[in-house]
Every structure is written in structure tokens, then in C-alpha cells.
RNA sequence: GCCCAGGUGGAGAAAUUGGUAACCUCGAAGCACUUAAAAUGCUUUGCCCGCAAGGGCUUGCCGGUUCGAGUCCGGCCCUGGGCACCA
């Protein structure tokens, strides 16, 4: 009798499956339903870690289950291989980013194969492959032609350490999410994607998707739509001449009103002053406003502050009077204008109407500077040192008194519109996507800058614009990309006028690369298109996408945007990339409770674990740990339990060849069949619902049952083992294959087998346990047949000794009966 | 401050979605095998009282609805994550 030795069998079957092309998905020529099971492709950081195992081996269980249930499954894999860490590692180890990345891909591919997952390696994609990024560039040009990619000067987040621009999403607590340096603000000309033009649809289309509610909410909050009105407050003419002494500026450039955005036009009668952001005030100064010294000082001080500093002062607001007034369009009274940095320059119009009675921030400010407070909305909430922000019924608002907030909002906005002083307006927190990176290791932006014609796209026939093989890829301090150093590559003819011109030197944010990779999987070798329509139609949109919650507001939103942008040009015929989405948790360190990472020296090397326990044990362990969408502390003790389980499965099958033991009786056969049948149903349902952990637990129970019979000396027929192995095969594909072929003597792979059938009749034959309660306390349980009538059960229960004892001499008030489950006698 | 997710034995967890709380696994204790250890197998293992039969208590806290609440409702306390002076 041989011993279970995973290291001996796992390599063998991995090779066998690859030779037989078992997991290569056919696009056409079959009548099965196609299913693209997507997992987030990894960044080739060096070594495969436990998080990768968790992210890829568990969904593989689902993929294998789908295959056994008649689906033509594509389970693709690839590498998201551009990005900063390659450059950082390159600088540190004096190796080219390309070599570093390729070395990692080679190593990780090998490690990924050791999982025994059903990856279709024939479809592998890598974002650094020129044949891939050629289409990334092509997509950029399509967006450019549609006005969705544009260049603009914006205040950007600048990381002084990495010397590059960061997207808002890459700034955490005002620090660079990669190196932790404090981020500065710089004004630079950047390439941007107009993601804001899809803001509404990015919110509204979520309702059709099968995604976790939390992910949908995160996106909705991120986009931050708020509906309200823009309102103009005319500036008091009497004071204008004093403030803007040059008559020419006054007449030509001066804005004669201050525009604000509000979600509460119903509180307009309570607007007792205006507050302007320092950014807007500075703009006024540029238009000829001669502000007082105090104002000038305040503005220059505020503008020096970082966002972090401004945020830290939320409790103690500062500000300064502008020295002139505006007119409230409803009350027609003059109200003072103030400048304060609690109003943000980059949101709304950069100015607000302050309603201190109904906004906490305005209240705090009014209190500090002695500004008037006027209550205009009445509701159950009291106004006592805390602004009443709830809606209610209007007071002190002239003809609008008595209206509800909702009604008043409409009427007041309508009134303002007629006077040309206001209109409905939606505001978004979402900003356009700054995709320029002043970095070497990325996709070159395929544009050419001509001094006569301006920016021109590279002709599509000349794609890809290959990344030049630079030796010096250190970023420059002046904000220009290292590509500016590639002399030969840089100089090109303008595609429009033919004169000497220069290539764009910025590269793209890697989120652009990863926002369309799922399409390429359907047709990875296509040289004429990013993917053929015919093939995309077979697989897309992706029915199910597994990944981490950290991509809720970045990758998932960007992919949706790119998909919608391509859809709007009829380049694809679907408008959402991922119909189904499930988030997995992450692996934490059990001692520190933090996310495990190699940099902190806490990581567990999966290669070592595979060598020690085998890939099947690892796979099952990750499935068994708990619900898949939860976070875990890595705890090695239970790995052993899973390995012991597989040892037992192995040993269980060994006596199959011997003839010792006695044949199962009819009753035993029935009992085992009922149990098996229940397991088929339960394990299938669990995998389908991604409850992999309870599926493992059911498998364990089933093996316990088999052992129970074996220990009584019974011989179990092969037909029963076959079912056990099929149920096990998605979880532990190697051991299942070994026992299936080498022990049971089958000729073809177990992974081509069908999922066992459920016999519904047998399910009904199982007896059930009836819980017998008296006054809601369990007094006894009885094993009964399914489907008995209430009267039959009642008779049985009342005859029960323990029940008799409890209800003796008492009056039965109620008899609760739940079919096949429970009775409760209330006395 | 706002929005999510969660809180169940010594640990990971389960609970047919309102019906026996703690399945399965780890750990621990005891026993068997062994010269011994490891491995393996068997037994016990939520807490309290009791020699036992048995009884009582228990799902973060306080209330409520119900014959019956881990599950539903109201209020509160922790933990993790996201957003955050967004008008």
C-alpha cells in the first residue's frame, strides 16, 4: 500500500493536462455555453504570495464545477506588467525594468502552474507586449478622436520622491500610496480622459449589474453626484468702483455677480453672507481687484497650505471680509462677501452661499465672526448651537412660507431661472482621469507635438509606438518624462504637415492597460483588431469577475469608463464590462492583524508550503478557511487538518483492490446512497453560491461516513467511490485524477466527467428529525418520515413520554406545527 | 461627521434565512499502538450546578415583536474598511 505523496503525483498530472490541452477554451464549434471566468491578472512583483493563491486557486474550484456542469469555461491569466515598482527595483538592483519584469513573469508563470488551476495558457496576455500595447495606444487614439482624451493644465498631485504625477486615487492621506512621501500640488499640462462625461451613466447603469452592494455604493460615493442649483448673487454696484478702480477692467473683465452652487435652494432666504474660496479670490485679483492688504495676506497664506493642512483646521475656521457686498436675490438685501479656505476652489463654482442656521460649517463660521443667523426651515429638530440641516417647512421666506423644502426648491429655482439668476445643476466629486505619467516603464502616449499643427495622433498604421530601449530611465526633476532623453526616437515628422516634430514623452497610467485586458483574452493573437467582434460576442460581457475590494473605485470604474467610451463609438456592442462581480478578502498576519506583505517580512512562502503539504492541500485549505469574501488571519494549524483529510481519502481508496471485507447490506447501501445524494446536492449548491468552505466540510463528512462503513469491515463498491472522487475533483484535482486513473483504472481524465446526478426521490426518503418543544423549550427529538400530516404528528407527540410529563394536568393553549421540522406545545 | 462590512466556544467557523446554537476543522486533555517519540486510531471538550439521572445559562450591550430571535425592529458600545470642510 503506497503512501499519499503529492510531490510525486502533482507535477505528473499538471503535465498531462497541458499535453492534453484540457483547459484550452474553444471559441466556436461546440454547443456548450461559453463562460469567461475572470480573475484580476497579477502584477509581476517577484514571487507568488499567499494572496495570489487565495485569489486564483479558489475561483478555479468554481471554474471546474462549471466545466463539469456543461459549460465551456475560459479561465485566462496574464500579467499587468508595466508600472512603477519595476523602475524602483531596477534603480535599486541596477537591472533594466524590462529584464526585471520578464524574469518575474517567467518565475511567476512557473509558480502559477504549480497550483493545478485550469488556466488557459494559450491565451496569456502581457501588457508590456508591443502587440498588446499597440491596441492600448489605438484605444487612446479612438478616445482622442472622440474628444474623450484631451490635454489640459491642471493642478496635479506631484510626488517629490517618485518624481511623477499621481492620480487622486493614488493619494492616500495626502501621501503617495507607493512611497509614502507627502504629495505636493503642481500646475502641469497633462493628458486626461473625460470620465466625467459618463458620470451619470456610471451611476445609473450600476443597477443592472450583479455586484456587491458595497462596491456599487463605493462607486456612487466616489462619483459623488449632488443635485441642486447654480445661483447668481449680483455684486452691489455702489461698491464696485471702490474695489475695481480701473474703469476699463471694471467694464470688460469684471464679473458682476458671484455664482454659487447649492443643494438647498430652499434655504436661500437664510443666506446671510457669501463665502469665496481663496482660489477664486486670487482669480479676481488677476482681473483687477484691488484687495486690501489683509485680504492679500490671507489669500497667499491659504494657498501655501497643503490640502492636509486645510483639512486639519476643520474645527477652527479662518477667513477675512472681502470688503464689499452682494445682493441676496430673494430678500434683495445686501449681504457681506467673505473669503475663507473652508470653501474649496476645485468643487462647484468655488463659492458658496452661507446659510448658518442650516449648515454646521456656515454656523461655526458665522459664530466666530459675528455674522447674522436667520432660520428659514422649521422641523422637529431644534436649533441650539448645532445647525438644523434637515428639511422641513419654510418660514420667514416671504411668499414661500409654509411650503415644504422640496416644493420650495422647485419654485425658488424656477423664479430665479425666469430672472436669469439661476438654473438647475448637477455637481460631481469625480474629476477627469489624469493619465499622463512622467515615467519610463509604461505605454508611450501615441501623440506627436508639432509647433505648427499642435498635437496630432500617430497614424494607426504606425502603431505600436514602441518604448525606446533607454539605458538612463531615471526620471527628471523638471517634470519631464525620461523619454525626452531618447533623442532618435523623439524626433519625428508631423503626420499632418511633415515638418520636424516631437513625440509625446509621457507614458500612460497602468490603469489604462488593465482597463481593457479582458477583451484581449477573447482573441489574444489578433493582429488586425484589438479583438474580433465575433469572438467578443461569444464571451462578453464577463459573466463573473473575482477580485479584491481595493479596486472598487479605481480599476472597476476605469474599465467601465473605457468600455462605455468604446461602446459610444460602436466599437463594441456591450456597455458594461463585468456583469457579475465578487470580492474576495485578503490574508492578514495572524499576530499583527495587518495585511500580510513581503516588505514587512511576514509573508509565507507558498512554494515551501506546496513542497511540504502539496498543492491540493493548499487549495482546499484556502477554500476551507472561511467565507470567500472575508478577510483571514493565516493560521497554519488548520492546514494540517486538510492534509490529514486528503491522506484519509487516499487510504480509503487503497483497499479497493483487495477483496477482503464483506458486502454492504441493502440497508447500508440505502443509507450510503442517501448520504451521497445529499452530498452531491449540498456540495454543488455550495460551490455555485461560492460557499467553498461549507463544501469542504460536507466532503469531510462524506469521507467520515465512508470510513464508518469501512471500519465495520464493509467493502464499498467502486461506483460509490467514483461519486466521492468527482465531488472532490474541483477542490483537489491532482489526487482525484491519480485515484481515478491509477487506482480505479479509468482511461480519460476525471476533469472531463459530468457532475453526478441528484436523485430527488432519494432526497425525500431521508428521515427527518422532528424537534419537540413544550413552551418553546426543547424536550425531545423524534426521527420521523418526511411528509406526515399534522394530525399524525400531533398524535405521536402527545404520546411521547417526556411530553406527557411536561403537560400533565395543564391546558394546551396552542399547538404549533412546522412540516418536517418542529412542534411546539404551549400550555 | 457620513456610508459600508462585521462582533457566535481556547482558534478558524456552521446554522436549511424566524425553528435543536456551535456542523466540519484546528488546538487541548485522556486512552490505545510503541522500548520511546512521531504518525495513526478512539474518547472527552461552550459555561454553571450535580456522583449521576438531570437541570439551568449562553450568539457585543439594553429593550421590543413572536409560541419561538444569532437571524426581524428600536437604541447603544466596540472592530475593520471607504469617503470626508464636496456646500
Image: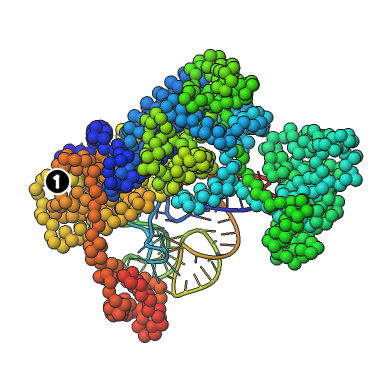
Q: Which residue appears at 22% of the width and 62% of the height?
A: A762
For the C terminus of chain A, which image quadrant?
bottom left
Q: Which residue appears at 52% of the width and 31% of the height?
A: A141
The part of the image, by quadrant, that contains residue A12 is top left
- Residue found at the far left of this picture: A659
Q: How is the image coloured?
A: rainbow
* Horizontal arrangement in the rendering, residue A396 relative to residue A727 (left or right): right
- Residue found at the far top of this picture: A488
* Horizontal arrangement in the rendering, residue A119 relative to residue A161 (left or right): left
Which SS class for mark 1?
helix
For the N terminus of chain A, which image quadrant?
top left
Residue underneath mark 1: A655
* Horizontal arrangement in the rendering, residue B45 relative to residue A390 (left or right): left
Q: Position of residue A207 (x, y in %)?
A: 50, 53
Q: Is residue A264 visible?
A: yes
Along the line of sight, the residue nearer the viewer: A647 or A509 = A509
- Depicted A48 relative to depicted A326: above or below: above
Along the line of sight, the residue nearer the viewer: A676 or A325 = A325
The part of the image, by quadrant, that contains residue A742 is top left
Q: Which residue appears at 62% of the width and 24% of the height?
A: A453
State which chain disc 1 sits on: A
- Depicted A62 relative to depicted A388: above or below: above
Q: Position of residue A265 (x, y in %)?
A: 72, 55
The part of the image, by quadrant, that contains residue A173 is top right
Q: Position of residue A784 (x, y in %)?
A: 26, 71
Q: Is residue A619 visible?
A: no
Q: Position of residue A281 (x, y in %)?
A: 78, 38
- Depicted A167 relative to depicted B61: above or below: above
* Horizontal arrangement in the rendering, residue A561 relative to residue A353 (left or right): left
| Label 1 Cα crowd, 10 Å radius (few <14 / some 14-19 / many 20+) | some
Amino acid at each position: 500500500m503506497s503512501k499519499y505523496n503529492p510531490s510525486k503525483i502533482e507535477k505528473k498530472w499538471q503535465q498531462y493536462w497541458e499535453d492534453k490541452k484540457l483547459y484550452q477554451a474553444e471559441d466556436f464549434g461546440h454547443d456548450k455555453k461559453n463562460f469567461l471566468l475572470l480573475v484580476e491578472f497579477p502584477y509581476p512583483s517577484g514571487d507568488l504570495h499567499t494572496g495570489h493563491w487565495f485569489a486564483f486557486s479558489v475561483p478555479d474550484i468554481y471554474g471546474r464545477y462549471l466545466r463539469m456542469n456543461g459549460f465551456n469555461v475560459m479561465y485566462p491569466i496574464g500579467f499587468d506588467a508595466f508600472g512603477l515598482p519595476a523602475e524602483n527595483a531596477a534603480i535599486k538592483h541596477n537591472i533594466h525594468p524590462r529584464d526585471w519584469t520578464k524574469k518575474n513573469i517567467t518565475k511567476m508563470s512557473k509558480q502559477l502552474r504549480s497550483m493545478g488551476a485550469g488556466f488557459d495558457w494559450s491565451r496569456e496576455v502581457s501588457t508590456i507586449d508591443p502587440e498588446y500595447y499597440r491596441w492600448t495606444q489605438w484605444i487612446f487614439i479612438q478616445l482622442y478622436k472622440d474628444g474623450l482624451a484631451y490635454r489640459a493644465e491642471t493642478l496635479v498631485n506631484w510626488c517629490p520622491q517618485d518624481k511623477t504625477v499621481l492620480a487622486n486615487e493614488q493619494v492616500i492621506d495626502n501621501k503617495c500610496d507607493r512611497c509614502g512621501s507627502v504629495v505636493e500640488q503642481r500646475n502641469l499640462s497633462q493628458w486626461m480622459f473625460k470620465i466625467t462625461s459618463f458620470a451619470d451613466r456610471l451611476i445609473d447603469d450600476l443597477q443592472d449589474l450583479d455586484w456587491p452592494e458595497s462596491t456599487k455604493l463605493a462607486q456612487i460615493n466616489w462619483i459623488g453626484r449632488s443635485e441642486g442649483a447654480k445661483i447668481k448673487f449680483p455684486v452691489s454696484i455702489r461698491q464696485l468702483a471702490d474695489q475695481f478702480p480701473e474703469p476699463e477692467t471694471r467694464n470688460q473683465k469684471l464679473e458682476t455677480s458671484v455664482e454659487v452652487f447649492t443643494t438647498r435652494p430652499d434655504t436661500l432666504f437664510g443666506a446671510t453672507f457669501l463665502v469665496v474660496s481663496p482660489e477664486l479670490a486670487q482669480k479676481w485679483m488677476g482681473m483687477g481687484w484691488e484687495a486690501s492688504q489683509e485680504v492679500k495676506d490671507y489669500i497667499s497664506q491659504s494657498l501655501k497650505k497643503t490640502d492636509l493642512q486645510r483639512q486639519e483646521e476643520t474645527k477652527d475656521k479662518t477667513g477675512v471680509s472681502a470688503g464689499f457686498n452682494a445682493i441676496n436675490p430673494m430678500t434683495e438685501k445686501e449681504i457681506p462677501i467673505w473669503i475663507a479656505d473652508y470653501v474649496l476652489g476645485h468643487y462647484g463654482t468655488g463659492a458658496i452661499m452661507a446659510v448658518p442656521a442650516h449648515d454646521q460649517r456656515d454656523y461655526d463660521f458665522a459664530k466666530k465672526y459675528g455674522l447674522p443667523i436667520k432660520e428659514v426651515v422649521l422641523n422637529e429638530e431644534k436649533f441650539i448651537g448645532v445647525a438644523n440641516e434637515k428639511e422641513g417647512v419654510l418660514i420667514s421666506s416671504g411668499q414661500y412660507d409654509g411650503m415644504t423644502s422640496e416644493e420650495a426648491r422647485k419654485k425658488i429655482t424656477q423664479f430665479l431661472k425666469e430672472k436669469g439668476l439661476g438654473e438647475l445643476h448637477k455637481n460631481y466629486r469625480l474629476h477627469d482621469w489624469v493619465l499622463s505619467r512622467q515615467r519610463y516603464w509604461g505605454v508611450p502616449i501615441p501623440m506627436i507635438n508639432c509647433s505648427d499643427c499642435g498635437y496630432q495622433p500617430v497614424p494607426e498604421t504606425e502603431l505600436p509606438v514602441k518604448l525606446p530601449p533607454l539605458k538612463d530611465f531615471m526620471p527628471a526633476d523638471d517634470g519631464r518624462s525620461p523619454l525626452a532623453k531618447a533623442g532618435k526616437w523623439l524626433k519625428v515628422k508631423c503626420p499632418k504637415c511633415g515638418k520636424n516634430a516631437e513625440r509625446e514623452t509621457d507614458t500612460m497610467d497602468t490603469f489604462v492597460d488593465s482597463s481593457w485586458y479582458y477583451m484581449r483574452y477573447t482573441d489574444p493573437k489578433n493582429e488586425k483588431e484589438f479583438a474580433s467582434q465575433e469572438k467578443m460576442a461569444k464571451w462578453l460581457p464577463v459573466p463573473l469577475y473575482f477580485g479584491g475590494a481595493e479596486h472598487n473605485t479605481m480599476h472597476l470604474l476605469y474599465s467601465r469608463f473605457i468600455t462605455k467610451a468604446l461602446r459610444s463609438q460602436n466599437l463594441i456592442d456591450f456597455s458594461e464590462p463585468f456583469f457579475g462581480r465578487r470580492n474576495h478578502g485578503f490574508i492578514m498576519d495572524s499576530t499583527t492583524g495587518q495585511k500580510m506583505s513581503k516588505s514587512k517580512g511576514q509573508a509565507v512562502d507558498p512554494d515551501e508550503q506546496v513542497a511540504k503539504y502539496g498543492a491540493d492541500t493548499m487549495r482546499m485549505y484556502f477554500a476551507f478557511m472561511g467565507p470567500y469574501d472575508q478577510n483571514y488571519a493565516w493560521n497554519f494549524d488548520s492546514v494540517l487538518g486538510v492534509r490529514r483529510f486528503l491522506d484519509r481519502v487516499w487510504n480509503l481508496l487503497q483497499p479497493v483492490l483487495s477483496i477482503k471485507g464483506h458486502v454492504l447490506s441493502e440497508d447500508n447501501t440505502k443509507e450510503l446512497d442517501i448520504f451521497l445524494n445529499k452530498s452531491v446536492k449540498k456540495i454543488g449548491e455550495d460551490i455555485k453560491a461560492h460557499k467553498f468552505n461549507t463544501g469542504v466540510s460536507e466532503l469531510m463528512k462524506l469521507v467520515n461516513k465512508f470510513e464508518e462503513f469501512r471500519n465495520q469491515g464493509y467493502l464499498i463498491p467502486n461506483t460509490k467511490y467514483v461519486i466521492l472522487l468527482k465531488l472532490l475533483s474541483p477542490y483537489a484535482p491532482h489526487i482525484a485524477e491519480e485515484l481515478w486513473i491509477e487506482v480505479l483504472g479509468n482511461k480519460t481524465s476525471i476533469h472531463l466527467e459530468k457532475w453526478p446526478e441528484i436523485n430527488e426521490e432519494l432526497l425525500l426518503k431521508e428521515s427527518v428529525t422532528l424537534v419537540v418543544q413544550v413552551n418553546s423549550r426543547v424536550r425531545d427529538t423524534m426521527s420521523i418520515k418526511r411528509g406526515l400530516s399534522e394530525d399524525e404528528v400531533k398524535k405521536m407527540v402527545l404520546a411521547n413520554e417526556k411530553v406527557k410529563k411536561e403537560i400533565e394536568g395543564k391546558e394546551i393553549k396552542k399547538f404549533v406545527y412546522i412540516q418536517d421540522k418542529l412542534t411546539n406545545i404551549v400550555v
